[in-house]
C-alpha cells in the first residue's frame, strides 16, 4: 500500500498556489513541490490530489493508494463522490477518472499537525512562483 499525503496552499485567495505531495512507498520516501497557477486554497487542495494521482499513475501503477489530506472539503467531497459546487465538480470528475485506474483508492482526513511535510512542500512551491 502506498501512503500519499497531499496539501495545497495559495498566497491570496485566489493567488499563486502550490501542491505539496509526500509519498511513503516500499520503505522509501518521495517529495514533490509543484507550483500551480492562480487558484483558491480549496482548488489547490484538489489539484494536489490530482497531481498525486498522476505521479502514482506513472510511478506506482496498480498499487493500493491510501491518501491523507487535512482538507475536510476535499476529503468529504471525494469520499461522498458528490458536490453541487460548480467549481469543484470538474475537479471531482478528474479524481474519479484517475482513481479508477487503481485497485483501491482511499482518502482520509488528518489534522493539519499530521500533514506538516506536505504543507511545507506546498508552501515551497508557492515560493518558486517568486523566483
Image (cartoon, helix red, strand yellow):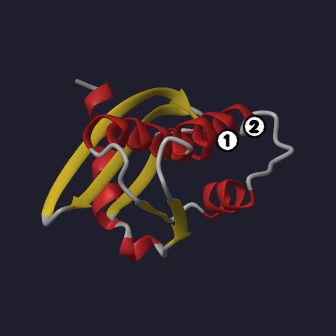
Q: Which quadrant of the figure has residue 56?
A: top left
- List x then y, in percent, for residue 52: 39, 44
- Distance Cα–Cα, label 1 vs label 2: 5 Å
The label number, if any, that marks residue 89 in the structure image: 2
Image height check: is 35 above or below 28? above
Q: Find residue 92 and name its label.
A: 1
Depicted 122 relative to depicted 91: above or below:
below
Q: Tags 1 and 2 in contact by the CB under 8 Å rule?
A: yes
How crowded pointer 2 is (Cα within 10 Å; few <14, some 14-19, many 20+) is rated as: some
User: Is the C terminus in the top left, top right, bottom left or bottom right quadrant?
Assistant: top left
**Which residue is at a point 45% across and 71% down the rendered structure image?**
112
5 over 110 or under it: above or below: above
- On-image quarter of the N terminus: bottom left
| Secondary element type, mark 2 | helix
| Along the viewing direction, whichever of 69 and 63 lies nearer the viewer | 63
Residue 121 in percent (x, y) is at: 28, 49
Quarter residue 113 falls in: bottom left
> What residue is rendered at 49% in x and 73% in y?
110
Residue at (52%, 31%) from the top-left corner?
15
Tell which residue pokes out farthest to the right in this image: 84
Examine the rendered structure and indicate whether residue 102 appears above or below residue 115: above
Q: Residue at x 49, y 41 (%)?
A: 101
Mark 1 neighbour class, 10 Å CA radius: few under 14, some 14 to 19, many 20 or more: many
> Depth check: 110 or 125 in front?
110
x and y, in percent, of residue 120 in the image: 29, 55
Amino acid at each position: 500500500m502506498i501512503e500519499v499525503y497531499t496539501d495545497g496552499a495559495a498566497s491570496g485567495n485566489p493567488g499563486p498556489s502550490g501542491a505539496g505531495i509526500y509519498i511513503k512507498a516500499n520503505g522509501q520516501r518521495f517529495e514533490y513541490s509543484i507550483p500551480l497557477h492562480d487558484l483558491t486554497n480549496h482548488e489547490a487542495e484538489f489539484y494536489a490530489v490530482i497531481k498525486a494521482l498522476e505521479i502514482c499513475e506513472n510511478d506506482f501503477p496498480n498499487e493500493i493508494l491510501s491518501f491523507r489530506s487535512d482538507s475536510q472539503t476535499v476529503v468529504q467531497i471525494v469520499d461522498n463522490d458528490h458536490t453541487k459546487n460548480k467549481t469543484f465538480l470538474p475537479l471531482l470528475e478528474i479524481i474519479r477518472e484517475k482513481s479508477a485506474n487503481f485497485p483501491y483508492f482511499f482518502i482520509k482526513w488528518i489534522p493539519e499537525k499530521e500533514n506538516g511535510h506536505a504543507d511545507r512542500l506546498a508552501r515551497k512551491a508557492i515560493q518558486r512562483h517568486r523566483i
